[in-house]
Amino acid sequence: MTHLNRHLCKYLLLLMLAMAVILPSAVLTSCGDDEPDLNIGYYMSINSKVRLNLTENDESQGTSAQPEADMLSYTIVRMREALKIAYPQPNKYGNDAAVITALDNIYKDYHAMYGHYEKNTVCVVKVYRARMDDEGVVKKSTPLKTYRFGAQPPSTE
């Protein structure tokens, strides 16, 4: 074996040894992201251009100059309630289908009445699936679905 071949063999042996040490640790690190001890929970983020009243005991529903804004508030309150009913307690498994179905049913009611205003989106609600610790601190979240709500633009008179 020539001198060059011996150096090449040593280099390849060192490279293979390094890969044997580095590769398993990289695989273990990437698998550790799942953190099986975390619970699954769901939450909604709300981004609205119109003022919303999101209390469940609102006695003024339907009394404003823009009834669709009141209906929007009422719809989002109903969505929050439906989320609690569909998934009352975080657990290790989650239930995306139950959460989305419950929220879709409520959104369909709003869309049936105000869907013709869809081009004038005034509110966006995003539903997230979250991995959280036992104290409820979100460690990682993934968007599941986005709901867009339209309303009649305010008069410019």
Image: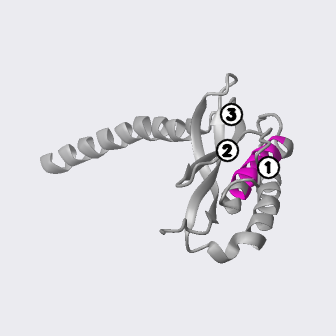
Return the x and y of residue 4 as percentages of the image width and height.
Answer: 14, 49
Q: Using the image, tell me which numbered label, if any, was put on residue 36.
A: 3
First in residue order: circle 1 vs circle 3: 3
Disc 2 element: loop
148 within the magenta span: no
What residue is rendered at 62% in x and 39% in y?
34
Neighbours of disc 1 within 10 Å: few (<14), some (14-19), many (20+): some
Mark 1 or mark 3, whichever is nearer to me: 1
The correct choice, above or below, for 27 with respect to 147 in the image is: above
Q: Name the residue under label 2.
A: 53
What residue is rendered at 56% in x and 61% in y?
122
Disc 1 element: helix
Q: Which quadrant of the figure has residue 146?
A: bottom right
Left-right relation of 21 to 148 = left
What residue is rendered at 60% in x and 52% in y?
143
Amino acid type, label 3: Pro
Return the x and y of residue 12 as percentages of the image width and height.
Answer: 29, 46
Amino acid type, label 2: Asn
The correct choice, above or below, for 121 with respect to 15 in the image is: below
Amino acid type, label 1: Arg
Q: Using the image, tell me which numbered label, if any, was put on residue 78.
A: 1
What residue is rendered at 78% in x and 51% in y?
99
Span highlighted in magenta in the image:
71-84
